[in-house]
Amino acid sequence: MNLSKKLGAEFFGTFWLVFGGCGSAVLAAGVPELGIGFAGVSMAFGLTVLTMVYAVGHISGGHFNPAVSIGLWMGGRFSAKELLPYIVIQVIAAIAAAAVLYVIASGKPGFELGGFAANGYGEHSPGGYSMIAALVAEVVLTFFFLIIILGATDKRAPKYLAGVAIGFALTLIHLISIPVTNTSVNPARSTGQALFVGDWALGQLWLFWVAPIIGAIIAGIVYKAFFEEK
């Protein structure tokens, strides 16, 4: 598969993840009669990944997340020469999705940007969690996300079930950590929303790059050392 097709698949997959996941938070979570709450937003993020893994995963590998690309590279599953193009297109897609979401959300009378599903810690954490708590949560959850991805896509794992495992993993991750950071585990997803919020969201964005990348790198090393078939 040529690189342009892979990047196209990554664009649409990442766009759908950010638009669907953050869209559920921005457009639906605050509507009392819908009542989807944290659980609904968590499910939305899981469903975006699950659906796109099956839609375009066979083209690009279905990363949709710079941390995933880095973790797969560290685990020996992804080419170094494609790493930067993947990360760039994932960030572009996330920004595009946030832009479309902003256009839709701002079409409602009385629109206020608010947090716009951005990630944060301290006073910008949904539950008021500290920077250290946010850092630990994002590292640990990204680590396990990559362990699940590496395991579910291992050639020894049951075929065709990887998307289900990965989608449910992302749902579980959100159920755990929305109160802590609004859940990132994905630097591209964090970047798109932060650019529109500006101010505090851009000031705290560093954590939502550093922590997921650290978690992904550790997972890639651990899986390759202990679980990969020799």
Image: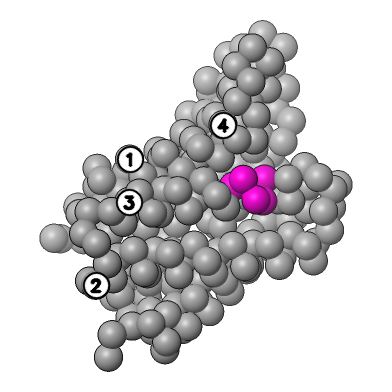
Q: Read off the residue under disc 2.
A: 156
- Would you say 166 lies left or right of 126 here? left
Q: CA distance from mark 1 to mark 2?
A: 23 Å
What is the x, y in percent for residue 22? 55, 36
Q: Is residue 84 visible?
A: no
Q: CA distance from mark 4 to mark 3?
A: 19 Å
Hey, what amino acid is under mark 4? Gly
What is the x, y in percent for residue 187? 55, 57
- Would you say 204 lies left or right of 172 here? right
Q: Read off the residue under disc 1.
A: 51
Bounds of the magenta segment: 174-178
Q: CA distance from mark 1 to mark 3?
A: 8 Å
- Look at the numbered discs 1 and 2 and tell me whether their residues touch, using CB distance below 8 Å: no
- Would you say 214 lies left or right of 134 here? left
Location of residue 117 with respect to 61 vertically, above or below: above
Q: Read off the residue under disc 4.
A: 40
Q: For mark 1, does the 10 Å Cα neighbourhood hold few (<14), some (14 to 19), or many (20 or more) residues?
A: some
